[in-house]
Image: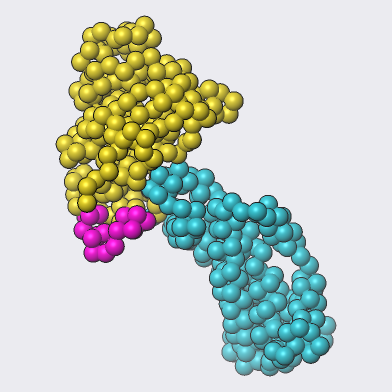
Chain colours: A cyan, B yellow
Amino acid sequence: MGEILSSFGLALRLIGSGDAELWHIVVLSLEVSLAAAILACAIGLPLGAAVAVGRFPGRRATIVTLNALLGLPSVVVGLVVYLLLSRAGPLGSLGILFTPGAIVVAQTLLVLPMVAALARQFVEDDWREYEEQLTSLGVSRPRAVPTLLWDGRYSLLTVALAGFGRAASEVGAVMIVGGNIDGVTRVMTTAIALETSKGDLPLALALGIVLVFVVLTLNAAVDAIRQWSVLRHG
Amino acid sequence: MAERAIFPLQARGVSITLGGHAALCAVSFSIEAGRRAMVLGANGAGKSVLLRVLHGLLVPSSGEIAWGGDGTRPREQAMVFQRPVMLRRPALANIAYALAVNGVAEPERSRRARAAIERVGLGHIGRRQARVLSGGEQQRVALARAWALKPRALFLDEPTASLDPAAATEVERVIAEIHAAGTTIVLTTHNLGFARRVADEILFLHQGRLTEQTAATQFFSHPQSPEAGAFLKAELP
């Protein structure tokens, strides 16, 4: 018990002292997760909205696939991305395996199904309310997609934040494709795993505290946005 | 460019089945340009369904809607729903959106949106978020949105339902102005006072069937069908 408490104290001191190694890891984590969240939203939001509004062959299959991908084990995604990006793989010529770029790719693939599935849910609810009105105004289904994305912007912003949180918390896939290389691809989650097994509890704890803080902040932001949008739009 | 003749607006033997229930049964009538036709009938008589079929949101199971003889549905017609859906943006932007979708470019778009919201007496709330406006204000924004599209026929589903008397009067005034500007009006209502004041002719629906199409002056004193007679007796003291 005493050791845990003293580790905790050291962890807080690490955070407070602006330890260079710690903050490098934190900043890198946030950068790659942000890039992954932006990419996943750029693809996932329009995709989800199109599935919500569209009537095309294979729509049902797309929904089932998206839902199935939600449960995809992180390490399997890591393995697949590893195989794609490895020297002998089809995307090996990019040479991004064991770089932050590879982490972005893996996180994007993990977050994309979640973003698309949630976007579909939100947009479909709005579409149910709007369909008759928009049709009456002469809005075609493809034209309705950007309208619904804009009208659902507050809900969809919360989806984006949730995606960012999910990306920042990933560990399995990130470990495989990033390699947890010190100073290059070491992010919060992989560093926590490594430092814990090495016995450097203060650093692991410090990173854990920052990660929890990030996730809590994101959730608070999601809640604030919801409250604010209800006040503003009823 | 000469305007295409879109009147008379005719229903020819229109039937429609919704969810296994015959909502409209062989309904036929004709509405001439510039009229104010009011569709009356009890709840579930098929009034809203009839408007949606005329507007083109629902396709009849049999029969047809013909515009101007044998023409197809023109673009110059609009509908205002009983509960209009406002987009999550300011009132004025809601009107501008409808214009944009219909290919009206700037600066014409802003000019027409501004003119429309002022004609319904809401120029001062154009920048307010549409969804937090009162029911009466939303109804008027919806009227402005439809009006901005310059429809030659306007369908209104219960435009004064669930509005307080002041708001209802205001909506009535706007409808009168739209009509005075040359738009043919087809509306459903439960408000018999409104119908008496405004209607040129009455279409009476009973259980999905049109029992009569009568001039308004005659309808209220001498309804032609026993169903309409019973309806008036029950509704009017």
Looking at the image, residue A46 sits to the left or right of residue B209; the answer is right
- x then y, percent, for residue A50: 56, 58
- Does residue B23 lie above or below A130 as drawn? above
Q: Residue at x 40, y 54 (%)?
A: B88
- Does residue B228 lie above or below A18 as drawn? above
Q: Which residues are magenta?
A: B99-114
Residues B104 and B162: in front is B104
Examine the structure image and report whether residue A165 is included in the region drawn in magenta: no
Looking at the image, residue B155 sits to the left or right of residue A94; the answer is left
Residues B151 and A46: in front is B151
Looking at the image, residue B141 sits to the left or right of residue A67; the answer is left
Query: Can residue A198 be seen by looking at this rendering?
Result: yes
- x then y, percent, for residue B183: 23, 38
Predominant secondary structure in magenta? helix
Q: Residue at x 37, y 56 (%)?
A: B101
- x then y, percent, for residue A113: 67, 64
Residues B1 and A145: in front is B1
Count all numbered tags in the image, as a single digit.
0
- x then y, percent, for residue B117: 23, 49
Query: Can residue B93 be seen by looking at this rendering?
Result: no
- Does residue B108 lie above or below B91 as drawn? below
Q: Residue at x 60, y 71 (%)?
A: A40
- Residue A79 falls in image quadrant: bottom right
- Residue A150 falls in image quadrant: bottom left
- Does residue B62 lie above or below A108 as drawn? above
Q: Quadrant of the N terminus of chain A?
A: bottom right
Q: Residue at x 56, y 64 (%)?
A: A45
- Residue B134 falls in image quadrant: top left
Looking at the image, residue A8 sits to the left or right of residue A224; the answer is right
